[in-house]
Image (cartoon, helix red, strand yellow):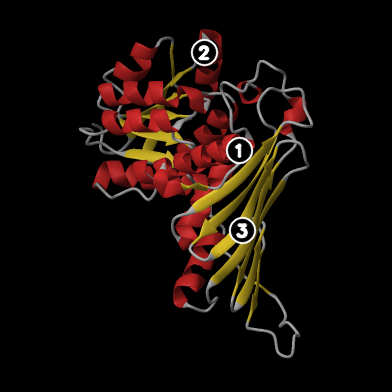
């Protein structure tokens, strides 16, 4: 392998794949040498933009001698198939979140990876946002006190622009709707900050579009003694909001501005909030730098199979809770 650059094939070049390609190209140790899409014309067009080879079949994308690793940025129902090809080819693998689209697939993947020794990384990049790094530091220090409750909203209005051919609109391909695609951001951030989610009680809805998959979802989630809410919608204007209430502080973060209010009330009068000066961080670039460091130097990745599995267990629990109309304990799944 060329030690100066790790040669990658980009699997999936539309939408988010195009976004990830820019992050990959910003890391000097990585180089996209091939891109693949089932439709050859799309692969050829992307190859011109990326200045790489268009792989016109899976064999060329995964088993060519000039490829060291793959970045999988396809719709998540196809992730298991492409991961399996990457393992067979002995490649390093980066797969976008969610890792796979069901618990059954996650259990299959666990067996597939049992003898796998290369780097396997899942793209849970939201935990890398500087606000969450700061919140974790303050929580560990004890300044915030104990977590009491939280409210998380991760939503956008994309569903109004989707036709029925799009995979997210189809129940058999996306049965958890936004609670899977967006909700795993929330579950991963929560577990990164505070530990494992113990229990969920969820409800999905499909009231605002004609799609067969859910277009909204809400889950009550328990972490130790704290209960909070996670709401996800594809039918409202964009919203990314995290609110955490502790025994000694309030925290409000919208992925851009972090506001903290420290200290308990004095005679029921709250202290003033302060805005934290956060560093600028490119979370997507950072995750690919970590991917490169793992391949080159053997460093453990922060978000590997175990973190990917926890996210899958979360949305599986939400699905079962919606189906059975009962709280679901994640450790029993």
Front-lying residue, 181 or 1: 181
> How far apart are the two marked residues, 3 and 2, measured between alpha carbons?
47 Å
Q: Which residue is mark 3?
A: 228
Q: Position of residue 266 (x, y in %)?
A: 71, 89
Q: Relative to residue 37, is residue 108 depicted above or below?
A: below
Mark in front: 3 vs 2: 3
Q: Position of residue 308 (x, y in %)?
A: 42, 41
Category of crowding for the residue at label 2, using alpha-carbon neighbours closer than 10 angstroms: few (below 14), some (14–19), many (at least 20): some
> On the rendered structure, is 298 left or right of 317?
left
Instruction: Tell me whether the residue at label 1 lies in contact with that at label 2, contact meaning CB atoms closer than 8 angstroms.
Output: no
Category of crowding for the residue at label 3, using alpha-carbon neighbours closer than 10 angstroms: few (below 14), some (14–19), many (at least 20): some
Q: What label sits on residue 68 in the rendered view?
A: none
Mark in front: 1 vs 3: 1
Instruction: Tell me whether the residue at label 3 lies in contact with that at label 2, contact meaning CB atoms closer than 8 angstroms.
Output: no
Q: Position of residue 224 (x, y in %)?
A: 48, 63
Q: What label sits on residue 44 in the rendered view?
A: 2
**Mark positioned earlier in the residue sequence (1 or 3):** 3
Q: Relative to residue 190, is residue 182 depicted above or below?
A: above
- Disc 1 secondary structure class: helix
Q: Relative to residue 243, is residue 24 depicted above or below?
A: above
Front-lying residue, 225 or 18: 225
> How far apart are the two marked residues, 1 and 2, measured between alpha carbons?
43 Å
Q: Is residue 279 visible?
A: no
Residue at 69 percent across and 43 percent down: it is 155
Q: Which residue is mark 1?
A: 322
Front-lying residue, 228 or 154: 228
Q: Relative to residue 111, is residue 52 depicted above or below?
A: above
Q: Residue furthest bottom?
A: 267
> How far apart are the two marked residues, 1 and 3, measured between alpha carbons?
17 Å
Mark in front: 1 vs 2: 1
Q: Position of residue 36 (x, y in %)?
A: 46, 18
Instruction: Kindly indicate the quadrant of the structure image that contains residue 273.
Output: bottom right
């Amino acid at each position: 392998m060329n030690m100066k650059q790790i040669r990658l094939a980009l699997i999936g070049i539309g939408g988010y794949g195009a976004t990830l390609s820019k992050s990959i190209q910003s890391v000097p140790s990585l180089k996209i040498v091939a891109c693949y899409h089932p439709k050859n014309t799309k692969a050829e067009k992307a190859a011109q933009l990326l200045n790489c080879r268009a792989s016109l079949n899976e064999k060329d994308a995964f088993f060519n001698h000039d490829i060291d690793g793959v970045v999988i940025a396809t719709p998540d129902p196809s992730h298991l198939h492409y991961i399996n090809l990457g393992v067979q080819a002995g490649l390093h693998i980066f797969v976008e979140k969610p890792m796979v689209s069901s618990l059954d697939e996650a259990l299959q993947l666990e067996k597939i990876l049992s003898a796998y020794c290369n780097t396997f990384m899942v793209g849970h990049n939201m935990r890398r946002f500087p606000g969450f790094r700061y919140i974790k530091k303050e929580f560990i220090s004890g300044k915030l006190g104990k977590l009491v409750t939280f409210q998380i909203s991760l939503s956008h209005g994309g569903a109004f622009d989707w036709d029925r051919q799009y995979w997210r609109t189809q129940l058999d391909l996306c049965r958890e709707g936004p609670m899977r695609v967006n909700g795993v951001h929330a579950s991963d951030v929560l577990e990164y900050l505070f530990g494992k989610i113990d229990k969920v009680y969820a409800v999905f809805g499909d009231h605002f579009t004609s799609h067969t998959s859910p277009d909204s979802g809400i889950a009550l989630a328990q972490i130790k003694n704290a209960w909070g809410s996670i709401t996800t919608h594809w039918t409202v204007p964009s919203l990314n909001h995290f609110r955490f209430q502790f025994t000694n502080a309030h925290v409000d973060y919208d992925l851009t501005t972090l506001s903290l209010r420290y200290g308990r009330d004095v005679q029921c009068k709250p202290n003033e909030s302060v805005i934290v000066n956060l560093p600028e961080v490119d979370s997507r670039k950072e995750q690919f730098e970590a991917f490169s460091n793992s391949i080159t130097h053997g460093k453990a990745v922060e978000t590997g199979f175990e973190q990917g599995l926890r996210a899958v267990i979360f949305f599986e629990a939400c699905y079962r809770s919606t189906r059975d109309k009962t709280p679901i304990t994640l450790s029993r799944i």
